Image (cartoon, rainbow, N blue to C red):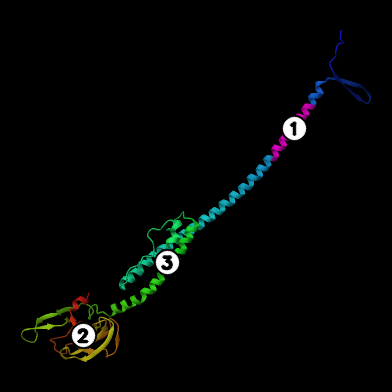
Amino acid sequence: MSPRRHPVRYTLWLARTGSAPRTFSLPAWVPLAVVVLLLGWSGLNLWLWQRTAEMRHLQLQLLRLSEQARSLNNQLALERERNNALSQDAQSLFKQLQVLEQEINTLRERAGMPKIKLVPTRSPAPDRAKERGAVPEPAGGAGTASLENALEYAGQQIEALSQKLSEVSPALQETLRREAAMPYGYPIRGLARITSHFGYRRNPFGWGFEFHNGIDFSAAYGTPVRVTGAGVVVEAGWKGPYGLAVVVDHGYGYRTLYGHLSSISVRVGQRLERGARVGTVGSTGRSTGPHLHYTVFRRGSEVNPLGYLD
């Protein structure tokens, strides 16, 4: 028979001074289990340390990303404010351009010149705006580049309108001079009653009819008589059946005559502006009583003054 095998055991002796030693007998698996437990505990601590280091690294990255996001949000807010400011400036400029264009067209129309169109009613697409010479109309959500292009375009249009205004200025001045020179309005201020019209009328001094080349206004003796347009006095004195009379050359083919005056306030060669006093109502010459005879000449021919009163 084979000898009987005894299980492996480990014995520990613990000695203490002054006392008898103690012995502990442990099975062989106990130390092995302790070693395995220590290794497992060390591995767990190592894994936890690595996880802690990774979490710390992730926290740092998250903090950096949060700071970057905050910085980007601030930049975005500033960019949005800048875009809004540019948009408002662009819209204001376009409105001013439209008003300026309307005013210039009004002046050009008065000067007898064709109208212009510089501010587009509809703008082309942003990518084709530059090559067509226009930019998209600014809006609240437009990009910075588009808004800057709109402002640049508005500046160019203002310069173009200034050039157009310089073009229309001479023609407008000529028109204004012509309008100022053309007879317009009543030669007597206030309520002036017409007693004799332009054309054929019954002869107030005898039989038959005669041609009356002007309009007679009934007015009190000494009432001021005023020129109806800017011009130069070419006659001032006695003028046959008109008695004391003044003739003013307005240029552009227009002349006016003021007859039957009681006094004359101007001299030949004097430059007059519309509304200037030329004399006072009287009854000189071929007259039946105090009144003003008013004649308008157009290129040397008498025309009906009624068309120049209103």
Instruction: Tell which residue pokes out farthest to the right in this image.
Output: 18
Task: Say if 72 sits above or below 217 in the image.
Answer: above
Which is more toward the observer, 192 or 102? 102
Using the rendered image of the protein, determine whether residue 271 is visible from the camera's viewpoint. yes
Relative to 170, is 255 on the left or the right? left
Q: Residue 228 at what x, y percent from top left? A: 25, 81
Give the vertical position of 285 relative to 111 (above or below). Answer: below
Q: Residues within 10 Å of mark 1 (few under 14, many from 20)?
A: few
Q: Which residues are magenta?
A: 35-53
Q: What secondary structure is marked by label 2?
A: strand
Q: Residue at x 56, y 51 (%)?
A: 73
The amino acid at mark 3 is Gln
Q: CA distance from mark 2 to mark 1?
A: 126 Å
Q: Nearer the viewer, residue 272 or 252?
A: 252
Q: Position of residue 155 (x, y in %)?
A: 45, 66
Which numbered disc covers residue 157? 3
Judging by the rendered image, the residue that carries numbered circle 2 is 258
Please say whether residue 134 is visible from this viewpoint.
no
- Counting from the top left corner in percent of width and height, residue 160 is at 41, 69
